[in-house]
Image (tube, helix red, strand yellow):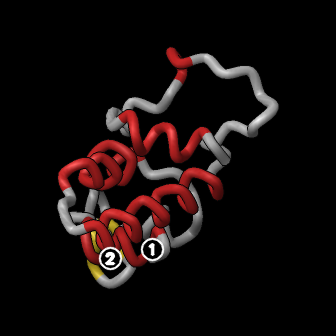
Amino acid sequence: MTPSQLAKTECANWNSGRCLNGEPKDCKVLSRHRCSYFEECVMPMVKYITDPRKKKETSEAILIYRTDNNMVKHRNATRNRSDAPRCHANGKLRQQHEEI
């Protein structure tokens, strides 16, 4: 799954590639830009998914989104737990992203 597919299926503001959050405009996720609604409302949903296949697909889409937007730390970077994105409260998911 890609970030745009995740937005299409899970974002309440999605309308045929247009964003209904505020005035209608192009979806930021489609244009590979950061979207605060996607980060605060869609991405955290992964911790509530019980189907292992869907959870894996969703986690992969989130990782792609984070990578595209330089939100993933590199292995050699100094790690500081206090600056971890708040949208990844699930420790297991946070660990997956930090292992990249």
- Nearer the observer, 31 or 22: 31
- Nearer the observer, 90 or 65: 90
Residue with the most extreme right position:
76
What amino acid does circle 1 point to?
Ser
Which residue appears at 24% of the width and 52% of the height? 45
Which residue appears at 25% of the width and 48% of the height? 47
- Which residue position holds label 1? 4
Q: Identify the element where label 1 is drawn.
A: helix
Percent x, y for residue 62?
A: 46, 57
Q: Contact, CB < 8 Å: mark 1 with mark 2? A: yes
Image quadrant holding the N terminus, namely: bottom left
Q: How many marks are shown on the rendered structure?
A: 2
Residue 28 lies left or right of residue 19; in this view the side is right
Percent x, y for residue 60?
A: 49, 64
- Which residue position holds label 2? 8
Residue 64 lies left or right of residue 51; in this view the side is right
Residue 83: which quarter of the image?
top right
Which residue appears at 58% of the width and 64% of the height? 32
What amino acid does circle 2 point to?
Lys
Q: Identify the element where label 2 is drawn.
A: helix
Percent x, y for residue 92?
A: 40, 40
Residue 48 lies left or right of residue 71; in this view the side is left
Residue 93: which quarter of the image?
top left
